[in-house]
Amino acid sequence: MQIFTGDQIAAELTALGITDVIWIPDTDMGRWESALESEKGLSLLRVCREGEAWPLAAGLMLGGRRPLVMMQTTGLYESGDALRNVVYDLNMPVAALIGARNWLTPHSTDTARRFAEPILDAWQLDWRLIACPDDRPLLRSHLTQCRNEHRAGFILLAE
Amino acid sequence: MAVCDSAAAIPLRDVLQVLADLRGETDVVVTNQGSSRVWPLLTRHPLDLHFNPSTMGGCVPLALGIVLSQPQRQVLALSGDGSLLMNLGCLVSVVAAGARGLTVILLDNNCYDITGGQNTAASSLNVDFAELARAAGFPAVAALDGRTSWQEELTGLMQQPGPRFGWIRVEPALREDLQTRQEPMADQLQRLRTHLNGRPPGPAEPEIGGSRKP
């Protein structure tokens, strides 16, 4: 089950006023590539390692853009210090959509699944889980609320 | 301890002073690690950002974000060799993004200067950073040290279409220079945003949509 199609996610990001998606895709997000690339007003920026994504987002925000970072939980773990620096040292209200690997796989023993929530909590991030199609409205409502309150907002998207 | 080629390395202050002289009035300069301590001793400008505290290797991506958001500007990223080694892929990201206004200056002192001058993994390898940049696709690359007419070559590099990459052999910073007290990050960011965008940061941004609690 894929909770958002490419067209749906592109429409949501447009509604949020997102100008740039910074990403390293996983299998699920990767299906959105053509929709994101073809969306007018949205720039798709590819980085080589997840640790680049957070300071890149900070630079874009400094210059007046509204980026969204997309990566998998594994990339989130890898890039933890860059995230810490941008959210807490630079006080940047970054927005991110994190693909939760194996969340929808019953009885998965994937350690990437096990540590998703504890890691987000350890970084003291304000996050919401989207685990089924009915949860889709959380994407817009949570990221909007976080932005309006000038704090980082994270969505954990079940895969 | 790292052994820098003292015959070829240029004093860091000399390199930074030339860069400060070349810098245009609307150009942004992002410093990092050692350069963030020394640059403010030479020059101050509202479009300076001394990225410290930082995440190692974050200087180039942050500068890339600024230039992509403000493509009419020139942005200068000053990175150390230890920092760049932590994030070499960013050179490919810069080229992929088509950041023509970005200049990456690698201040290569062949060691981790801030932590006391320890070797990096590259210290004994003669890594050719210019070739790495060329291989990543940088169209304008210069390799400079004290044996070259480096001031003229640096000036020439800055006049070429970007993204540009300048690899400069420098001496480690003077110990006393590294003690420079920095402007608080919050103050830096507010000043920079105001001068980049012509308005105050954060709270002045218009709210969007309706806020719905989940």
Image (spheres, helix red, strand yellow):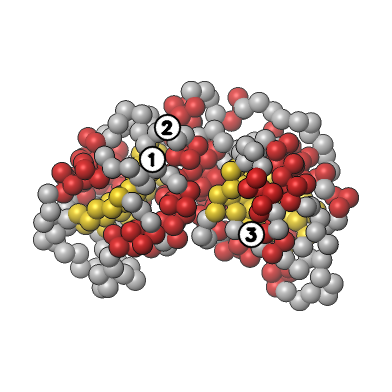
In what quadrant of the picture does the C terminus of chain B appear?
Answer: top right
Q: Is residue B74 above or below residue B92?
A: above
Q: Chain of mark 3?
A: A
Q: Are marks 3 and 2 in contact (CB under 8 Å)?
A: no
Question: Which residue occupies 44% across, 26% down?
Answer: B195
Question: Which residue occupies 32% across, 28% down?
Answer: B25
Q: Are marks 2 and 1 in contact (CB under 8 Å)?
A: yes
Q: Is residue B108 left or right of residue A65?
A: left
Q: Chain of mark 1?
A: B
Place of residue A85 in the rendered image (x, y in percent of width and height, measured from the top left): 52, 50
The reply to whether residue A91 is visible in this rendering is: no
Place of residue A38 in the rendered image (x, y in percent of width and height, measured from the top left): 65, 45
Label 1 sits on what residue type?
Gly
Upstream in the sequence, badge 2 or badge 1? 2
What numbered label is drawn on residue A25? 3
Q: Is residue B130 above or below residue B39?
A: below
Question: Which residue occupies 68% across, 45% down?
Answer: A153
Could you tell me which secondary element the residue under label 2 belongs to?
loop
Place of residue B27 in the rendered image (x, y in percent of width and height, measured from the top left): 35, 33
State the CA–CA distance, disc 3 to disc 2. 30 Å
Residue at image mark 1: B101
> In the rendered picture of this protein, how many numbered marks are placed on residues?
3
The local crowd at label 2, few if under 14, some if 14 to 19, many if 20 or more residues have their Cα within 10 Å, is few
Residue at image mark 2: B72
In what quadrant of the picture does the N terminus of chain B appear?
Answer: bottom left
Q: Chain of mark 2?
A: B
Label 2 sits on what residue type?
Gln
Could you tell me which secondary element the residue under label 1 belongs to?
loop
Q: Are marks 3 and 1 in contact (CB under 8 Å)?
A: no
